[in-house]
Amino acid sequence: MSGGGTETPVACDAAQGGKKRDSLGTPGAAHLIIKDLGEIHSRLLDHRPVTQGEIRYFVKEFEEKRGLRELRVLKNLENTIQETNECLLPKCRETMECGLGETLQRLQAANDSICRLQQREQERKKVINDYLTASEKRRLVQWEEFVSGQPQRRAEVDEEHRRAVERLREQYAAMEKDLAKFSTF
């Protein structure tokens, strides 16, 4: 292999028909080396076949266990539904029917009470509105009487004021006369 010469044929090569084995420097030899390395690599480092077998086994086990677990869950669910249909549903229906009649009676009584209260409130509002309307009409009549009587009252007050002013003038005139009598002294 060293020395750059050609290799001598090996006995098995001679048995193959005298075909010479490729030397390391030729392209065919590199191909054989790569092929050998690939086989070594696949045997030592490539664990895909083993891994795939393990994965298949794991999936099979998982599906079997999962199938059994789901079967148990479905059985439990079926038992629960059956128990509900046979025991709980009739009890609930019976309780509802008993309580529903009583509840309906209470609701009807409450509804009647509320209707009476609303009717009383409406009647009270109507009475108050009627009273307010009547009071407003009375006050309007009183106001009109007051306004229509104002000119007459004003005339009376003006006349009374004029008389009072006249009386005061006469009184002051008399007082001035009396004062004039005394001032001559």
Image (tube, grey):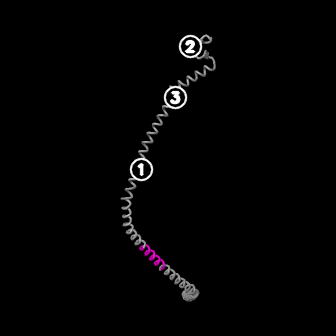
Residue 162 x, y percent position in the rendering: 58, 87
Residue 158 sits in which quadrant?
Answer: bottom right
Q: Residue at x 39, y 67 (%)?
A: 100
The answer for how far apart the CA atoms under marks 3 and 2 are is 34 Å
Q: Quadrant of the C terminus?
A: bottom right
- Region of the chain picked out in magenta, as a range: 112-126
The residue under label 2 is 11
The residue under label 3 is 46
In the image, residue 158 sits, relative to residue 17, either above or below, namely: below
In the image, residue 107 sits, relative to residue 129, either above or below, namely: above
- Given residues 167 and 126, the one toward you in this image is 126
**Is-magenta flag for residue 121?**
yes
Nearest-to-viewer mark from 3 and 2: 2
Mark 3 or mark 2: which comes first in sequence? 2
Identify residue type, mark 3. Answer: Asp
The residue under label 1 is 74
The answer for how far apart the CA atoms under marks 1 and 3 are is 43 Å
